[in-house]
Structures are given as structure tokens and as C-alpha cells.
Amino acid sequence: MIVVLLGAPGSGKGTQATKLKDALGIAHISTGDILRESIKKGTPVGKKAKEYMEAGGLVPDSIIIEIIAQRIKEPDCKKGFILDGFPRTVKQAESLDGILKESNLKIDKVISMDVTDSIVIERLSGRRTCRKCGVNFHIKYNAPAKENICDKCGGELYQRNDDKAETIKHRLEVYRKDTYPLLEYYKKAVINIKADEDIDKITERLMALIKGK
Ligand code: AP5
């Protein structure tokens, strides 16, 4: 099972992919998480990506495509995977088609999670992320049991640099310019869902869609 989750920054892709991964027993591939981990470790990819990410722009396609080509060969992807934050440009989508074709694989579902800009701003400005395991919380909608402490691993929660007001605005512009055209690219396959309800309701809807109900 290969699922592509599309949607603006803050539409809830990461939150839902984490839950779907557990429910479906498939891998969750977040290019954002992979890049943040590379920055943390100071790898060459992390060094190249840092500036783009902090400014809210896109990391060059060539870097991202190479990351995905390697990642989907890993053993945990054998049963399938959820792509969260990839593809983000038409070039990335075309490359993904080529990579999957080489392995006789195909995308099963493309789902776009639709939210308004005001929801994006509210969600991203209230998001807190665990420094240790990367899980996301929200100060109002998905608050941790103890303030600033991750429920899952006890790590410290922090606010991502790109979740500051000015950068969120720029990320939305980049989404509209570079990622929105993917809805046209996938127009025969894409299923749009309203992603402004509560987290568990959206998971239920996604599970029903993925299981073809
Ligand atoms: P990335 O980490 O992928 O960021 P993003 O796509 O902008 O998405 P976010 O992680 O901000 O949001 P999300 O949709 O996952 O929402 P979440 O579930 O966290 O990418 C970061 C950067 O890396 C990019 O800007 C770019 O520079 C680079 N990059 C990554 N991939 C790339 C690629 N393919 N090509 C080029 N560059 C790339 O939810 C947000 C908040 O809302 C959380 O606090 C959550 O608790 C809360 N929430 C979620 N759902 C709900 C709900 N239903 N109700 C209330 N609150 C909710």
C-alpha cells in the first residue's frame, strides 16, 4: 500500500501519517523529518538544506529525490509506505513515478488534506515538536499531559524555527506556487478531504478511504 498525503503546511499530514502508520503497519516517510534529522546530525545534506528550510523555501529537487530513492529501498517499506511532504513539486512527482516504475510499484491513494489559511496559521503557531522523537503536539488541540514534555518519550518540546509568523506566510506562498499544481498532476487520482475536523475523526475518514469503504 502506497499512500501520498498532500496538503498545505499545517494541514495535519504528519499527525495523520503517524496514526496511519500504526494502524496500517506500513512506513511513514516524512521528508521534513529526514531533513531535520540530517541538520541535527550535521550531515552534508543537512548543511545544504538548513538555509532553505529556515527561510520556508523548498530544498532543491535533486537532494529530495535522492533521499526518497534511497529511503523506499529500506526494509520497513516492503509492506508499503505513506509519503508525507513528498512530492512537493511536479518534478518530484515525475521522478517518483519513475522510481516506483523501476520497482514495479504504484501509488494506491493520493489524498489532499484541505484547510484554510487561518487554520494553518493557528495550527502552526501552536505546534510544539519533540526534540528527541519528533512527535508533534499542539498547545490547544493536542496538548501534552505535562507542559513542554513529550508524552511519548519524555523529550523536551520546542517551537520549530519555520513555525514563526513571517515564515509560515512564506511557506503558504511556496505551497501555492510549487505544490498546488500537483493537484492537477494527480487530478485523475486525487481525493480531497476537509481536514478541519478533530484529529480522530479525520483518521477515521482516512482509514475508510484507504481501505476503500
Ligand atoms: P515539513 O516538515 O514537511 O513541513 P510542512 O509540509 O510544511 O508540513 P508541516 O510539518 O508544517 O505540517 P503538517 O501538515 O505535517 O501538520 P502537522 O500534522 O504537524 O517540511 C519542512 C521544510 O522542509 C519545508 O518547508 C522545506 O523547506 C523542506 N522540505 C520538506 N519536504 C520537502 C520536499 N519534498 N521538497 C523540498 N523541500 C522539502 O500539524 C500541525 C499542527 O496542527 C500540530 O501542532 C498538530 O498537533 C495540529 N493538528 C493537526 N491536525 C489537527 C486537527 N485536525 N485539529 C487541530 N489541530 C491539529
Image (tube, rainbow, N blue to C red):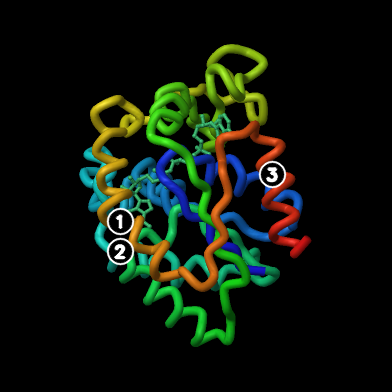
Residue 45 numbered tag? 1
Circle 2: residue type: Ile
Vertical position of residue 157 compared to residue 192: above or below: above
**Residue in the image at 59% along x and 22% along y:** 141
Residue under circle 3? 203
Q: Tell me which numbered mark, 2 or 1, is placed earlier along the sequence.
A: 1
What residue would you read off at disc 2?
A: 63
Residue 110 x/y as whole percent: 55, 63
State if disc 2 and disc 3 touch (CB < 8 Å): no
On screen, residue 89 versus residue 135, left or right, reads left
> At label 3, which amino acid type do we have?
Thr
Residue 167: image quadrant is: top left
Which residue is painted at 58% across and 49% down in the image?
A: 193
Q: Cα distance, mark 2 to mark 1?
A: 7 Å
Query: Is the CB of mark 2 within 8 Å of ligand 1?
Result: yes
Residue type at mark 1: give it. Answer: Val
Labels 2 & 1 near each other (Cβ < 8 A):
yes
Compared to residue 123, the image places residue 101 above or below, namely below
Corner quadrant of residue 170:
top left
Percent position (x, y) of residue 191?
57, 60
Give the structural element (helix, strand or loop) at label 2: helix
Q: Secondary structure at mark 3?
A: helix
Question: Which residue is at 46% across, 22% downward?
Answer: 126
Q: Taking 211 as reference, is 53 left or right?
A: left
Specify which label sits upstream in the sequence, 3 or 2: 2
Residue 95 visible in rendering = yes
Please tell me whether mark 1 sits on a helix, a strand or a loop. helix
* Local crowd size for mark 2, using a 10 Å CA cut-off: few (<14), some (14–19), many (≥20): few
Disc nearest the viewer among 3 and 2: 3
